[in-house]
Image (cartoon, rainbow, N blue to C red):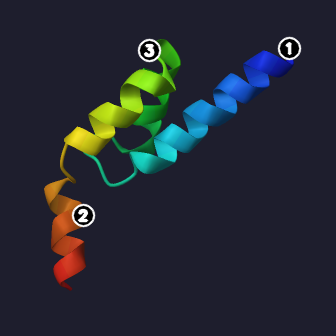
Amino acid sequence: MVELVIYVAFCAVTGLFGIDRRMGFIGTFLLTLLTTPVIMIPVLLLTGRSARARSNDRL
């Protein structure tokens, strides 16, 4: 049971890294639940931010 809570917590942290991505928090979190944070973190580091997030930086 403790392992499941820790796994979901790591998935939530990975979802936070995906907030500025096209899928957002929910999409990243759900995909991380299906795969694993070890796979998703490098994917998030290799992909760029969404156009919306980049345009918000200019304001």
- Does residue 28 appear left or right of residue 12 in this picture? left
Label 3's element? loop
Image quarter of the C terminus:
bottom left
Answer yes or no: is residue 27 visible.
Answer: no
What is the crowding at mark 2: few (fewer than 14 residues within 10 Å), some, or many (at least 20)?
some
Residue found 68% across the figure and 35% down from its top: 9
Q: Position of residue 40 (x, y in %)?
A: 38, 28
Q: Quadrant of residue 1?
A: top right
Where 14 falls versus 34 (above or below)?
below
Mark nearer the N terminus (3 vs 2): 3
Where 37 falls versus 15 (above or below)?
above
Find disc 2 in the rendering and name its residue: 53
Cα distance, mark 2 to mark 1?
A: 37 Å
Residue found 17% across the figure and 82% down from its top: 58
Identified by mark 2, the residue type is Ala
- Does residue 59 appear left or right of residue 14 in this picture? left
Residue found 52% across the figure and 20% down from its top: 33
Any mark on residue 35, and which? 3
Answer yes or no: is residue 9 visible.
Answer: yes
Identified by mark 3, the residue type is Thr
